[in-house]
Structure formats: structure tokens, C-alpha cells
Image (cartoon, rainbow, N blue to C red):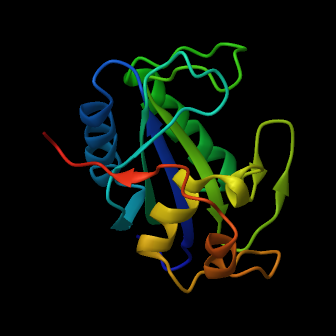
Amino acid sequence: MPSSTTLCYIALGSNQGDPVNKALSAITVLKQTAELNITAVSSLYRSAPMGPQDQPDYINGVIALETALPPLALLDLLQKIELEHGRERKDERWGPRTLDLDILLYGQENINNTRLTVPHYGMKQREFVIYPLLEIAPQLMLPCGASLISLAAQCDRNGLEIYQAS
């Protein structure tokens, strides 16, 4: 990795087509990607779906990585991995996903353009982001100055649990 890398946090979610294996496969692909240096991976969590409840529970996690890629190049890479895992882009908000990889944080940058908003617009209210992130980066401060610990204290777990293979 070049010396000028940025620490990023990526949310991972799946609830279609064997979501545990989709999540594990995506983590493996990210670990094997030369432009990325994975520094931490949370446990996998089971969460109830946001929005329509007539879909399976999600498997979620968070990955910390260092990269020299600029934000949009990282987004392109993540979207390519999503497509390779069967992701179909639809207009349905909060619908089922084979794989969803979202940039939560890109260093301490604030990014707001037509393709990318960082910090991720919903991360402060989503238990399936906050708690996996807390697991791997408990001292994290967001660009807005809020601590992750303070966000977790205000975020209900809503039944979120660490995934246990049966």
C-alpha cells in the first residue's frame, strides 16, 4: 500500500441467495483486492429488514480498510463486487439485496455528490451499522464530532444479534 492511504469503513449487507455465504465471499474478495488493506472485520449480525417486512432478515457487518483509491474509484470497485455477487440495481428502496456494500466513512471527509454521500446518510440511526462498527472501532469519532459510543447509546438494537451458524 502507498504511504498516503485513507482509513475507510464499509457496511456489508445481504438477505438474498444465501446471505451468509454472500457476505463471506465479499469479505474474501475485498481481502484479495490489491488496492485495499483490510484492517478489521466485524462479526456478522442478523437484523430485521428496514422498510418492507415481507422479506428475509439481513446479514450485516462492517469492514475497516485502508486504501489509496479516491472515493469514487472505491465506490466503483464496491459496485463491481456487488454486481459479481448478483446485485441488480432497482429503484426499490430498502428492498431485498443479494449484496450491498456501502461506504460509511472515508477518513474524516464529508462528500456529497450525485453518486456518493459520506458519511453515509443513514448510518447514525441504523443499529446494523452502529453495533458492528462499535465492535471494530469503539473509539471512532465521526467527521461531525460525534463519538460512536454516544451514537450507540442512543440507538436501539431492534433485535440485532450476532449471527450464530446453526
Q: Position of residue 141 (x, y in %)?
A: 67, 81
Q: Quadrant of the C terminus?
A: top left
Residue shown at 61% from the left, 51% from the top: 103
Residue at 59% across, 81% down: 140
The residue that appears at 61% across and 59% down in the rendered structure is 156
Q: Nearer the viewer, residue 158 or 100?
A: 158
Report the quarter where the N terminus lies: bottom left
Residue 38 on image: x %, y %: 36, 64
Please identify the quarter of the rendering in which residue 132 is found. Answer: bottom left
In the picture, measured across the screen, residue 21 lies left or right of residue 149, that is: left
Give the mark count.
0
Q: Position of residue 115 (x, y in %)?
A: 78, 37
User: Is the residue 147 above or below the residue 70 in the image?
Assistant: below
Query: Is residue 134 placed above or below 147 in the rendered structure?
Result: above
Q: Residue furthest left?
A: 166
Farthest residue, direction bottom: 139
Using the rendered image of the protein, determine whether residue 67 is visible from the camera's viewpoint. Answer: no
Give the residue furthest to the right: 113
Which residue appears at 45% of the width and 65% of the height? 64
Residue 116 horizontal/vertical position (percent): 76, 44
Q: Is residue 134 left or right of residue 164?
A: right
> Residue 127, can we see it?
yes
